[in-house]
Amino acid sequence: MNRSDSKSIILERIRQALDDVQQTDHPKAIDRNYRMQSDMPDDECISLFAERVREYKAEVKIVDRADEMGAVLESLRSRNARRVVLAPGFPDKGLLEDEFTVVKDEPVPLSNKALDECDAVVTSSFLGIAETGTIILNGSEGQGRRALSLIPDFHVCVVPSNRIRGIVPEAIEELNNVIKKNPAPITFISGPSATSDIELNRVEGVHGPRTLHVIISMGAGACTGNISCRT
Amino acid sequence: MNTPTFEQTAKQYIENDQLRRNIGFATKTIREKRKTVVEEMPDWEELREAGQQIKDRVVKNLDSYLLQLEESVQRAGGHVHWARDGEEANQIIIDLVKDKGVSEVVKVKSITTDEIKLNDALQQAGIDALETDLAELIVQLANDEPSHILVPAIHKNRTEIKELFSSAIGLPDLSDSPEELTNAARLYLRKKFLNAKVGISGGNFAVAETGTISVVESEGNGRMCITMPEMLISVLGIEKVIPTWQDLEVFMQLLPRSSTAERMNPYTNFWTGVSENDGPKEFHLILLDNGRTRVLSDPGGRDTLHCIRCSACLNVCPVYERTGGHAYHSVYPGPIGAILTPQLRGPEDKSAASLPYASSLCGACYEVCPVKINIPEILVHLRGKVVSHQKETGGWRAKIQPEHAGMYMMARAFQSRSRYEGAQKLARGGMKLFERDGMVSKLPGYLSGWTSARDLKPIPNESFRDWWRTRQ
């Protein structure tokens, strides 16, 4: 049978299977009685985010925005990184180049092999979720394409404090506004990669970066109230 | 091939101490962790309710959501294929891979591709499919079958895995520490990832509105398979579609806590068609029926399609905990498998027809199900279907089978008061013959199954109705 028929056959099977169901143009709205927004004050939100990310065995530093690059440098030094990939658009102010071999993904994208030879990657992030300790990357400014934050073994990720949301629905809503304009790939990262496949022993670090440092950058642009958080 | 029934092989698995210990430990650990992360959510019940409602809507409007999904994926530069069964899906994949001119593909753990036996089909076509999830790799190297949805190699201990890695991937100097074994897998697979041309995945959700597909995972092998190859092929059952992006706010809370018992799994991938300068240049989505429309056609079993494959029901099931996954002879074990497998395969499959009986109907699975599938109710419904099917196809032998005859008599007895009371008197008299020391501990013939493991209290001399009558 022709493959193009399969679509009509499956759709016909579905319609027949549902012949007992009354189809309506105005289905009842889904009862969304769960929390849509958290009522946490901002400082609580930030410290919960830090706490939850730490529980995944990632290192978390909370610094003033002015000290952001200092914290990045300190992280890279602490793991003896030498070759470092810098995500396009990450505002490093040229500070990394004095100390590390900085590799860039533009104008020519790096080969997989070149990426694999890097010790670390530095990226920004799109959002954080406090309740789940999740970092969200969507390829926007300072994050780079997905391979950048995947292949090097050590990921240093900067999360501006005003990008931290309380709960999952707040982050999904914000992504909703973005994805319909720019459907770029999105990655949720909650701690370093892990497996519990051998006798249920948790081992941190399988294929993704085995070490994750998260730098929460406070200060300029940090929120002073829940409302400013969402602008 | 004749697949054995559940009761034919369950016993041999129960007698395997190692297996039972491993499964018991795994289920208990995950069960307790799940309880903690679920109880900290103040709105868990509201999320479950929303999850149930969304899935109900999807299933009842499946055709329009699939068409919308197809349009969205195509708009984003992806290709969509429809496959009536596993064979067709496999052929589509083989053709795509051959067109690409490669003989090896990397795979993300996917039960759907296990269901359609994709790896075997690829192998027959001369294509090696490399499983990249650690547990799936272990199962594949051992030529074994997964035993749990979430932790497929839970039946193997570290010594077995060490020996397997030594012989199968030539690493003789390994210790049996999980860290070292995991690192061995990392090194073995890294080369493969960096040179992969084709990746194959399943998918957890497909958003009709945006065409976005998502894969939740822990190890990063998913990120590798989804990001690195030139071509990505994803196989999703038609029931995996969800209407809107917003619906992810429900499922991204329900799934990780129910599945790995974490607040969030380490990695979740979302991609929409193909993106310029990021990831595969070619994306193919295969929408698979393979019995799902059969499940859909039964209003009493339809809710089975709400399942988001979290495996919480396995971990609380007293039957699964003792037999493990292999006894179910299906890629879908445990309570969800006991209702899904027989419906996917249809009433002719005798092995699958035994599965609705692999339950004590205790209801624990319903309580933990994140989308509130009433598994016990569907089990009972399916038992009824199994019996009717036997009656319809089994000829006169099936009709005079004691259980059917007994049920027929019961039905007659319950139809009128006089018959009911007469039957009571008869049973009371009959039971006297088997009563010893005020208990019935041995019934004859067909009824002996009931008393083989428990004593029965005899029917009292006087029924409530008799007593009521004399009182007046």
Image (spheres, coloured by chain):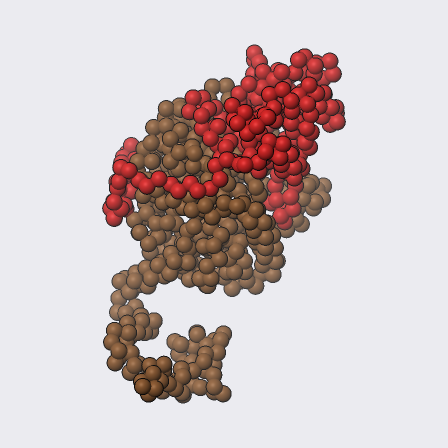
Chain colours: A red, B brown
**Residue A211 vs residue B364: left or right?**
right
Q: Nearer the viewer, residue A172 or B320?
A: A172
Residue at 53% over, 20% down? A140
Please determine whether, in this image, residue B353 is positioned above or below residue B83.
Answer: below
**Residue A92 vs residue B6: left or right?**
right
Q: Which percent across, then down, holds residue A221? A: 60, 21
Residue at 67% over, 44% down? B178
Residue at 56% over, 51% down? B35
Any part of residue A192 in sight: no
Q: Quadrant of the C terminus of chain B?
A: bottom left
Q: Which percent across, then down, holds residue B358? A: 45, 61
Q: Which percent across, then down, holds residue B184? A: 66, 38
Q: Quadrant of the N terminus of chain B?
A: bottom left
Q: Nearer the viewer, residue A175 or B112?
A: A175
Q: Which percent across, then down, holds residue A43? A: 63, 32
**Residue A187 vs residue A81: left or right?**
left
Residue at 55% over, 18% down? A141
**Residue A17 vs residue B98: left or right?**
left
